[in-house]
Image (cartoon, rainbow, N blue to C red):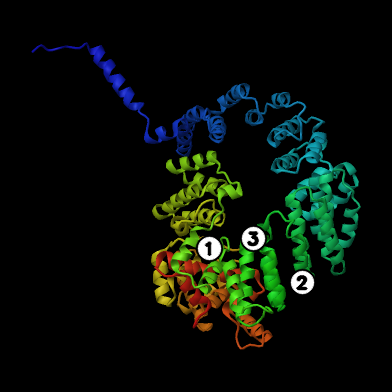
Amino acid sequence: MHKVYFPTSLIILVLCMTFSACAQQPTELELKYGVDAYYFEGVCLVNEGETELASTKFQRASNSKNKLIADLSTEQMIANLPEEKRVSAAENLYRRKRNDFTLALLLQELFAKENYKRILALTPNLDFEKSDDKVIFYRCAALLKSKDPSFPGIFNKWSLVKPFSNYHQQIFAMVQEEDDNEFAFSSDLVRFSNAASLADWTTSFAYVYRVLADKKNRQPHIMQYAGKVLLNGSSKYEYNASVFEKSIPVHDGAQFYVDFYTARMLEKVEEQRELAATKYQNAMKSAADEKQFDLGLWYYLNLLMEISPQRAVAAIEKYKEQWHDPSYFEDFFDTLSAKLLGEKLWETYYNTARMIDGYAPDESTAKFSYVSARLIESDLFTVQGADKDQICHVLFSRALHSGTDLYYKFLAAKKLGMSQGDIEAELEGIYTKPEESGFTPNKEIEKLIEGYIDFDLYDEVYALSYDHVHEISLECAKKAAAYLQLCGDTSDESFYPQSLRIASRKFRKSDAPLDIGIQKLNFPRYYSDLVSLNAAEKHLDESLLYALVRTESYFDTNAESWAGAVGLSQLMPSTAAELARRAHLETYDLKDAGTNLSFGAAYLADLVRSLEGNAILASCAYNGGIGRIRNWKKSFAASLERESIPTDLFVEMIPITETRNYGLKISSGTAMYAYLYYDKNPLDVIASLIFPGE
């Protein structure tokens, strides 16, 4: 056998080629994402502090066919270069791609280098209506820093043409910071707009009359500011309304704000409410778009409801075919329902249920249909000439189709004698078909979310998914929520509420059937060991305790309400102090999950015992106070000349919206948890809560 000898140089060359080929083998994620993978790798490198290497990754990703990824990569490419290289890189980019986006990137780098002359050379003769606010910002900033005498006029023009944005506010703040700012003193319009945009009503009120006196200022966004300022900056509502009404705008789109805010001010004066109603009607006539029309109509209906619920119902009959977004009126119908019941206007209530079918949101129609049926069942109202059982069946059947409102769906299904299989099919059917809504998912955003998940960029997953949840498909939202749930299980429990927020927002407005996956993401069992322990110790149903924590805090241990309630079960410090005293605890932490759940379960158990075992009344008391619940029970029963009132009708009559809706959420939430995790029929569960003893 002959030995074959290869030259050393050849061996080295082959080895180098082999190792080079191995090093260049693309990873699984690089194969999946192609050039887009460089963007995600770049973000990972930035998080690790490898900014310069990240910049090279972003440069390669800037050629992505996904415009969103390309723009993000371009921005990050420049931001992560060494400072001395950023300007030239931005200049080269702008030469290759001339648009507002690349121009703004270049201006940003030039401003950091204080090259104001170059900024001004790049931004002559800007069209303030069409140019990007960020580009205008840098021109104004450069003028200010250069002490150019044209600055005040340019800034005033920008404020006149465009609504006062965050960029305007930054320029205004820069003016105040300048040592020698005599040349840059802002006009009344600028000072007014800055204060109004920050809801500083006192400061902006000092300028509002002078601003309105100049006719050229009467642009739509300025008239909107002026209306808000006159409404909130002074209690002289009649005088302010008369002045504002005489401020004839120069732009057609501004008349709506004159009519609308004149009505808002007059509504504050008892004897002027009829005139306010007329002004709201004028606002609807002058509305420039569908949103303005619905806004004017919403206020008009709410005003009429305060004057007389029956007048509001008559206005619904008149305008029901004219509103554009039915969901906008859901809270109005909720309040109207309670008012009609509170005034015992049973016939008007029933007629409203029939009238709004096909026009109001499904959730509102379901409420009115279900409650009407229960009024008839309870012999509080009789439909002349109609078969009681038949008409109740029709109303319950309509209530079954309640959109995303599970409460009325479950109760109606129970009344109709449906099976668990029937209700499971109903649950999956809660969605709007894309062909009916015109919904098309944003594939660029979905690709970005999927990449963030695959590259384990959790902060980016939540921010993008939450902000754009109505632009992505149910499947994409499920992936994001499931990923964040996994992060909570394996890393940090603060991811739990993030997962739930995404799941619940998509649950309410889905483009596909709500399968068991999204149902469980929307009704998760976090802190299961603690919930099981405290439910057993306090003799509470686990499903009820889960529903309470979900409703109170979305499983956020750090949650704090505006009223001062803290933690998973949102306990007030005074309530917690009493519970701690009884438990002989001198120190405790309400943001500790175990402590908070122990206190919350104990408090709920006390309320259940005090209210004769009625878990839903106890839940309402948890939110609104046991004293109120007891007083309402007595007064409602007395007004109906009955010893007691059915739980479902009692909850509907609660005059405080938050407490009323709290009872509905706890009921449906308890039923869902029992169904999803404890193999119980949700219809039987909600019936046991609402109709105990039946």
Which residue is depicted at the point 52% across and 27% down? 63
Which residue is depicted at the point 58% across and 71% down? 396
Q: CA distance from mark 1 to mark 3?
A: 27 Å
Closer to the observer: label 1 or label 3? 3
For label 2, the SS is: helix
Q: Depth check: give the residue in front, 187 or 311.
A: 311
Report the quarter where the N terminus lies. Answer: top left
Task: Tell me where residue 562 sits by quadrant.
Answer: bottom right
Mark on residue 310?
Answer: 2
Closer to the observer: label 1 or label 2? 2
Mark 2: give few (<14), some (14-19) or many (20+) Cα within 10 Å: some
Answer with mark 1 or mark 2, whichever residue precedes in sequence: 2
Q: Position of residue 262 (x, y in %)?
A: 84, 57
Q: CA distance from mark 3 to mark 2?
A: 20 Å
Q: How many marks?
A: 3
Mark 2: which amino acid? Gln
Residue linked to disc 1: 553
